[in-house]
Amino acid sequence: MKISIFAATVLAVLATADAAQHHKIKLTKSTAVVPDSYIIELEDNFSGSHAQFLNSVSSKFNDAGLTMRQSYDSELFKGMSVKIKNTASSKTKRGLHHAGSTAVLNAIADSPQVRNIYPVSIIPRPKVQVISTGHTNSPDVLFADTMTQVQDTHNYGYKGKGITVGIIDTGVDYTHPALGGCFGPKCKVALGYDLVGNAYTGAANSIPVPDPDPLDACGAASGAEGHGTHVSGIVAAQDHKYNFTGVAPEAKLGMWRVFGCTGQVTDDVIIQALLMAYEAKVDIISLSLGGSSNWEEEVSSVVADRIVGKGTPVVIAASNSGADGFGQIGSPGTGRRVTTVASFDNSYFLAPYFTVDTIPKTKFNYVLASFNSASMPNGTIAASASSTTVTNDACNGVTIPSAVSGKIALVRRGTCTFDEKAGNIAKAGAIGMLVYDNAGGNAFEPSTTSNTIPVAGIGADAGAEIFKALSKGAAKGTFLTDLSPAPIPTVDTVSDFSSVGPLNENQFKPNIAGIGGQVFSTLPLYLGGYGTYSGTSMATPYVSGSIALMLQALGKKSPQYLLESLQNHAHLAPVYNGIDGLDNPIRQGAGLVQVLDAIKDHGHITPGQISFNDTANFVKSVTLKISNNGKSAITYTISNNVSMAVTPYNVAESGYTPLAPIAYSNASANIKFSARRITVKPGKTVSVRVSAIPPKTNPKDHIHYGGFIQFQASKGAKTLHVPYFGVVGNNKDLPIYDTASGFPALYDPTLTTQYTTETYVLDRSNLNGTAPAIVIRLLTGTAYIEAQLLNEKKDFVGYTETDLVYLPRNTLETGSQYLTTTWQGSYVPKGFKQTGTSVAAPDGYYYIKFRALKQLGNPSKNSDYETWTTPRIQLKN
Ligand SMILES: *[C@@H]1O[C@H](CO)[C@@H](O)[C@H](O)[C@H]1NC(C)=O
Ligand SMILES: *[C@@H]1O[C@H](CO)[C@@H](O)[C@H](O)[C@H]1NC(C)=O
Ligand SMILES: *[C@@H]1O[C@H](CO)[C@@H](O)[C@H](O)[C@H]1NC(C)=O
Ligand SMILES: *[C@@H]1O[C@H](CO)[C@@H](O)[C@H](O)[C@H]1NC(C)=O
Ligand SMILES: *[C@@H]1O[C@H](CO)[C@@H](O)[C@H](O)[C@H]1NC(C)=O
Ligand SMILES: *[C@@H]1O[C@H](CO)[C@@H](O)[C@H](O)[C@H]1NC(C)=O
Ligand SMILES: *[C@@H]1O[C@H](CO)[C@@H](O)[C@H](O)[C@H]1NC(C)=O
């Protein structure tokens, strides 16, 4: 894949000033960090106040400019996040060039009370696809409750009573009648806090202004989308007027608000919110947010995992990076024991409709393109092609009949962009364009960026029917803004946006799925009160609400038990798009929740999921324990229900640039069982050993085979499944650097000129103008990169960077295509890595060698690193 460096307008800079160089400093892993801001984790035995700690560090400097961002004093996490002034100045003159935030950071790291230091990472505001706003009087049909047994569970009387779900999100409009109308112990929204305030954006200079009220009163003009209100409604809305209920309508809610009206949040705020929700003793914590990562070692993921370890389920979105290929789970959703949620598409969504005067009694749903959202005019419809088989309809302006002038043109989707079609159609004088799907699909949103006339997408069948009507005579369309339910063709399959696992060390993620594609729920009253949104953000509260129903029905159970029960009983989805086979567990997890089965059925299997790992670390066998908590024996017949394999690369065509999105293949594993048929007596547990014989595909392809170990139950009990996957090939063989695209590479600071053979001159008196930019593109996430400084003879003399840890791979998305770092002439001498003291390098000639640890590599084995060395650099004054 050819990637142009100039495609990226803003490059993410890894280390801000010179790299902070101390072994406790876990420098950056995500591409987006807040400059000069760090999370300091203190040892458990830390005593004293955080302020005293900072004072003792500050006293070593003239002007350290240290300010506290967040402070943590929990049994689960002790420490604080701080900002250091970039121009901090030093008192100590140990003959070292020691100024700026690096010196202060190293002084913090020197304290024996400090365990780890992490940069403060930015977590983007969750992206939702807004499908429509507004409601009908029969929204229940839209809520997919029959796909998940939520409706049946309600009918049993379980509606979440006595359970509190803590949500970490953008705040909530609790003045909404469906959300109780008030805030406080007697209200539906019973708990919570606003950690940030309306104006907070997560930017470096944006200071949180906390207050005790998590209300989202941003107002429509602010640009807020009401994310937290939508999420809250999915968990627990109860609206008598429109008969709309969330998954657990009698549950209470807590809201810890971490986003302002617009903008992002930082992970130090998320950690604070996690700890606050935990201390408030909510029964479940739900987070519909995440940043790119795919490592479980991310600090917010570690805190979420520790909370699960204490017995509170934490349910987190897998993220919406399905388009970027495999291995794209966001943090904190990467936490090991966290319930990480994938999304399935719903059955119906609400769309406006139009009628055609010559086709009586039919409502055709349409979706307006959002770029120019002027309403569709009413008027005569005219076809722009002679038949529905013209594939390049309206792609060529010359062929458009003059009959469309002054009318609404009916156009087939395909061949050229919607913008091109709309441009040609507008030029021909049409007043609007209706595009019908060319592949049997339903009403859809045409993505446009420049249309001057209103454009709307309609279903293929609607297009064909209207086309036929036009051949019989003129027809007039009347466009209403009322909404009516429109079927979703991808119903009951994994949403295309849902992030694909596994994690970088082959951990099983995502774990389970909820409904997240086109979900109707509450919106703030300032946005009209109701709307349909899409995202793993929506699937996550669906699962949190499901767990609330389980907790009410089953009483206190461990997070592991609850997740396993959901996994054992989940519904499996086929791949959508014409492939005949089950979707892989690294996409659907165990499948879609089936809440009543998870509550009522007596069978239970632990573990609830299996990773057979890669070839080098192949797990030879796993023992499954099947128990029966019912009153009669259950007999299970055990088999292997294979899924499609995921093909993460097309090695022949695009090397190890991950396919975006993934592709599938038919390869499947054989599974051997120690028993084919078992009978589990009431109150007993039976063990079955399972082992896999992976398919014999080329190890270079790294296919992820998968499937579901199926326990077909005798009458009266439910069939159970344990999802599994494994990799043919070794993660360690995957290249780290995208050398085929010309990276890593050394550039001047403006990224204008690349240096390949010529000596690069770094002038210490003009760092701004001469400090080089080293641009790296990671095809594979790496746990560790260090930059070694070599002298003129290429002898190793020290480090220009130590401890760049847990880096995510780069993708093809703008903004995450590269990592960029720099060298400003200082280094940590060889032998001083543990102290991390950096000094100025003497003038002379150097090379920098970047060593990246291969996935699942041994850090102390030289051959497990991939290296790249810069051209020669001359350092001078
Ligand atoms: C606190 O714990 C750390 C790590 O175990 C240890 O190095 C340090 O000496 C301890 N400090 C005190 C005061 O016990
Ligand atoms: C509300 O929804 C429930 C469940 O779908 C249904 O049984 C009931 O008839 C509905 N009530 C109204 C007034 O529509
Ligand atoms: C089209 O006609 C309907 C029904 O009369 C009306 O509600 C709607 O506002 C009209 N649309 C426009 C753009 O005038
Ligand atoms: C896969 O093997 C590696 C190396 O032993 C190990 O670090 C990793 O945790 C394993 N993954 C799983 C999910 O067991
Ligand atoms: C595999 O699972 C799917 C979905 O549950 C089911 O429809 C199919 O019958 C199963 N296949 C076998 C061979 O049991
Ligand atoms: C799987 O195998 C079937 C039958 O051989 C074939 O038609 C299909 O294209 C294969 N699918 C994929 C994704 O390779
Ligand atoms: C650093 O260089 C950039 C352009 O490369 C320039 O815009 C900026 O003003 C310079 N800053 C200083 C402090 O010289």
Image (cartoon, helix red, strand yellow):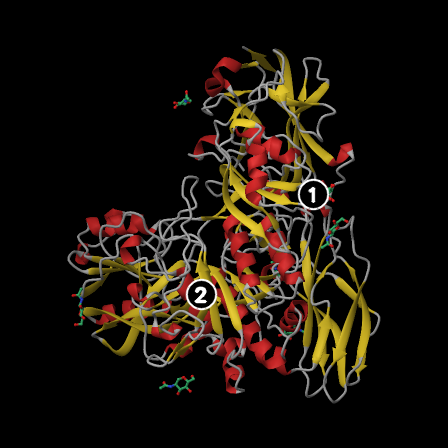
Q: Position of residue 138 (x, y in %)?
A: 36, 80
Q: Which mark is residue 80?
A: none
Disc 2: which residue: 231
- The reply to whether the C-beta atoms of the residues labelled 2 and 1 are less than 8 Å apart is no
Q: Out of 621 and 368, give the one closest to the viewer.
A: 621
The 10 Å Cα crowd at callout 2, few under 14, some 14 to 19, many 20 or more, is: many
Question: Please, what is the three-letter code of the amino acid marked with disc 1?
Answer: Gln
The reply, left or right, for residue 771 in relation to residue 313 is left
Q: Quadrant of ligand 3?
A: bottom left
Percent x, y for residue 686? 81, 76
Residue sitting farthest toward the left: 406
- Percent x, y of residue 515: 50, 68
Q: Which residue is mark 1?
A: 855
Q: CA distance from mark 2 to mark 1?
A: 36 Å
Density class for disc 1 (Cα within 10 Å; few <14, some 14-19, many ≥20) is many
Q: Earlier in the sequence, mark 2 or mark 1?
A: 2
Give coordinates of residue 702: x percent, y percent. 68, 49
Q: Is residue 318 visible?
A: no
Image side of residue 618 versus residue 327, left or right: right
Q: Amino acid at mark 2?
A: Val
Q: Is residue 653 visible?
A: yes
| Figure quadrant of the N terminus | top right
**Split into 4 quadrants, where in the image is the C terminus?**
top right
Q: Residue at x 33, y 80 (%)?
A: 241
